[in-house]
Image (tube, helix red, strand yellow):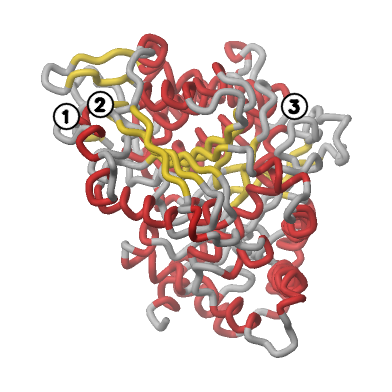
Amino acid sequence: TTEKMVTKGVQFPINSKGSRSTTEVAKSIWSKAFAACSLDPSNDEILKEKLRKLDSEPNWRKNYDSHVFDLYLHHVVDTPEKTVEFCKQGIKATYEQFEFVCDEENGEAMNLQTYMDQSTSELPDTFVVETKTYKKNAPVAIEDLLFINNNDETLKSSSKSSSYHESSKREQVLDWLRMRQADGEMESDVVYAIEQLLENYQEGKQWEKELKEIYFVLLGATSELCPFQNLIDLGLNVIAIARPNKARQAKLINYVEAAANGSTLTLPIVARNQATNSVSDVEPYNNDTISNVCGADVLVDTAAIRNWLLSLYPGKRMVIGSYIYLDGGNHVRANVATDAITASTVEKREDVHVSFLASPATVYPIPVAAYEDSVKRRATQEKSSPLWYSLVGKVLGPFKPNVQPSVVATQVNLSAADQSKEIHLYNGIINVQGPNYLLAKTLQNWRCVVCREVDKRRVSMNCAPTCTTESVMHVPAVARSVKGMRSFPPLNYYEPGLARNLMSMLLLYDMSSPASTANPLVELKNPMYIISTNAVHGGLWRSPDSLPSISKAAFLYGLTK
């Protein structure tokens, strides 16, 4: 597709036709990344032919998924070294392509990496909000975190059960998690991680003390699945970055002032916000005035945000998380921008770690238990499927197996607990989401592998479930398909508040536990397995049928919901 040539900031490059083509850029990035999977791609005829077909694909929007998955399946996870090189070269190719438009009037632009290297002077002002100490509110207890600000009926009904008392809230949380695991919606390591968090995040214990010293940087702080509210409720420190918008910035400020004692919120104020509203004009502040000037846009203030993060709280531990979602090519632009901020901060500052919510809709290895369960469910279904299942399959097209045969790697990390050379790659690509979504989310995967394996930083990268967020449900056809998922067990969608609470707890575990795979000292048999631990996949990995093959049927069932 061709993106409209817009404005200042991180952009796709202009091609020979004078347009910004997302397709040309995507093909180039994928091709260079996959080429790194061969020590000598010029003499690897099989790989070379596949890359030729990718480059010459006439209908990229329709067929991108088959090219990408085939190359993943046969080349990416052959050895740990190839996997790392694949990720490094994918990132390198991205930075070779993207540019930063410095002046929207005359179109002046430079390479994005050059812009980040040269733009070191602009430094936003800082505004800090602290909980009003006279309130003396106690932070939310960790065992209560799962229950707040969500509308999930299964969790609500269990919390009202007479068999539970306040003293057994911990057991209630774990019982609910075990039920979801037994239903196939999450993996067993999720239950273990939350159990460890509930045990170790208590007042006065080491995990609580360490987490209270961390500054959590939230890029996209107002997005639905961002852990902003959870971190503030626990009395932790947040650096929130969201686009300048009076209502949204006021909402962030108000939440902190009404929250638990001990939490802090740090906000940026970029120079262009002060052109008409200076900080000095609004001191002593009130929310109606200060919210006019707070905020920064990752697409436009990319280097300024990086400079600001480098200047804040010297010597303190920092975790940078990206939670921004935009549509189409803008989603790629936003992820490139947040990657530029994250990577250059990690490079220039010690003790900076990263977090993302992994998308189930990319390509990555899954645990053998999930793979075998999917195969077993498929076999059972083929033997004893209900009549409606066969009829729907004949009318709308066959339901296809969810998992592919395993890949046998040439080499795995022999220091890992699992040393089997069998790797079960999951094809989570949903064609209708489009190639821009896949590239944007894969860039996050690449960054996580490089940060963990090369930079040796902690990386929280847990798979989040399908959620009924506004970004998903605003498209009627998609909303109906999501609503119909529950007709195909073990598939399930989650209410955003519940998913946010659960993923926030996994983030805290990852930044605390020495045993978490977020810790680069924990050995993985292939670096890509960072994406497949502590996964709340909503049944996608264990389903007998692939999600694309049941999407039409799910849509029809969704019409009745």
Displayed quadrant of residue 146: bottom right
In this rendering, would 257 be left or right of 274? right
Query: At 74% across and 31% down in the image, what residue appears?
Result: 520
Does residue 63 appear in the picture of this structure? no
Camera-side mark, 1 or 3: 1
Depth check, front residue: 504 or 238: 238
The Cα atoms of the two marked residues, 2 and 3, are separated by: 48 Å
Residue lying furthest front: 134
**Rendered location of residue 283, percent (x, y):** 27, 39
Query: Could you tell me if the residues under marks 1 and 2 are in contact, i.e. CB atoms within 8 Å?
Result: yes
Classify 28 as above or below 329.
Answer: above
Few, some or many C-alpha atoms within 10 Å of disc 3 (few <14, some 14-19, many ≥20)? some
Element under disc 1: loop
Q: Amino acid at mark 2?
A: Ala
Classify 81 as above or below 281.
Answer: above
**Rendered location of residue 402, percent (x, y):** 63, 58
The Cα atoms of the two marked residues, 1 and 3, are separated by: 53 Å
Q: Amino acid at mark 3?
A: Thr
Residue carrying label 3: 79
Element under disc 2: helix
Query: At 63% across and 60% down in the image, what residue appears?
Result: 401
Does residue 76 appear in the picture of this structure? yes
Element under disc 3: loop
Depth check, front residue: 438 or 415: 415
The tag on residue 275 is: 1
